[in-house]
Amino acid sequence: MVKIGNIEVGEFPLILAPMEDVSDPPFRALCKENGADLMFTEFISSEGLIRDAVKSTQKLDIFEYERPIGIQIFGNEISSMREATEIATAANPDIIDINYGCPVKKVAGKGAGAGILQDIPKMVEMTAEIVKSTQLPVTVKTRLGWDDKTKYIKEVAEKLQDVGIQALSVHGRTRKQMYKGVADWTLIGEIKDNPRIEIPIFGNGDIDSAEKAREYKERYNVDGIMLGRASIGYPWIFNEIKHFLATGKKLSPPTIQQRVDVCKRHFEFSLKWKGPVLGVVEMRRHYSNYFKGIPHFKEFRSQLVQSMDQQEIISLLDKIDELFAQHQFT
């Protein structure tokens, strides 16, 4: 059984990655139902928490059925991150996670997220202060390095463990790569094989099928896998991987009806949590993923992303069910 501190997260945990505008309560609920062992909130700005900004504090919403659940924070000021840790701890998650991996310019360019990979001493100091600021286990999500010349992740893993983190998730790309190219798990495997490393090591990047999950589990010996983009509009991937690891057999993909049912539930939860405007607008990013592979879906997508009428959207989803019920996915 893999443990983060004293929290059991499964024999080989499958983890929902923290994704901005994706890993919200509506989506997390579906991933939990479909086999996610551990989930994290969207990343939350430390400065936003300190200022009590609505967008940041709303992301602290967690529910009992989600446990174990981690709150992820990011920032570039040690004092602010320490204060944000105390605020996040008061929301009663199971884990505090630090984002040292976000590559987008508005975050990394200010020295937060993956930006801190250019200042490893500060990264270690900040982590130590966060660990001291909470009684909860602290974990880190990061990347191999800033660029190909600074892949210091093996040394960084030791330093972060030494200051008290309880697990490490590594995305197999540098910040410079963003999400391009192929994720390289070689160094992730080397961290796991390092006899000095005692904490769980989770691999992240490019896992988009049950077969690939098993291949990477066996090749790199990681303690678990973190899934991001492959889960968007496809929460079934967690159970598909679990079933394949347990039996060697693939589950049948979800039917059109299952896709429509889950998409509708996602939409309804989105409305409930975000309200009638934001709930409609922020759902739009998910439709293409739920119905990937359906012929002529473009026409429906166009209508789904233009409508602000809740009932019209439900009717369009029902129509997809009626028209494509016999469509077979491969």
Image (cartoon, grey):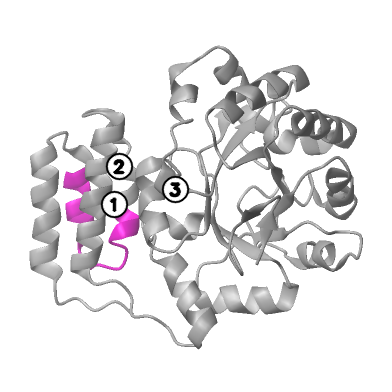
Position of 307 relative to 145 (above/below): above
Residue lying at 55% horizontally and 19% vertically, measured from the top left: 48
Q: Are marks 1 and 2 in contact (CB under 8 Å)?
A: yes
- Residue corresponding to mark 1: 287
- What is the secondary structure assignment of the residue under circle 3? helix
> Mark 3 or mark 2, which has the lower sequence index?
3
- Residue corresponding to mark 3: 66
- Relative to the observer, which residue lies in front, 180 or 35? 35
- Residue corresponding to mark 2: 283
Q: Is residue 134 left or right of residue 323?
A: right
Q: Amino acid at mark 1?
A: Tyr
Looking at the image, which residue sits at the far top?
51
Residue 239, how many percent across, how many down? 43, 70
Q: Amino acid at mark 2?
A: Met
Q: Quadrant of the N terminus?
A: bottom right
Looking at the image, which residue sits at the far bottom?
248
Q: Give the alpha-carbon distance from disc 1 to disc 2, as whole Å.
A: 7 Å
Residue 142, how many percent across, how many down? 71, 46
Nearest to the eye among marks 1 and 3: give it.
Answer: 3
- What is the secondary structure assignment of the residue under circle 2? loop
Give the magenta range.
288-304
Q: Amino acid at mark 3?
A: Glu
Mark 2 Cα shell of 10 Å, populated few (<14), some (14-19), many (≥20): many
Q: Determine if the magenta segment contains residue 229.
A: no
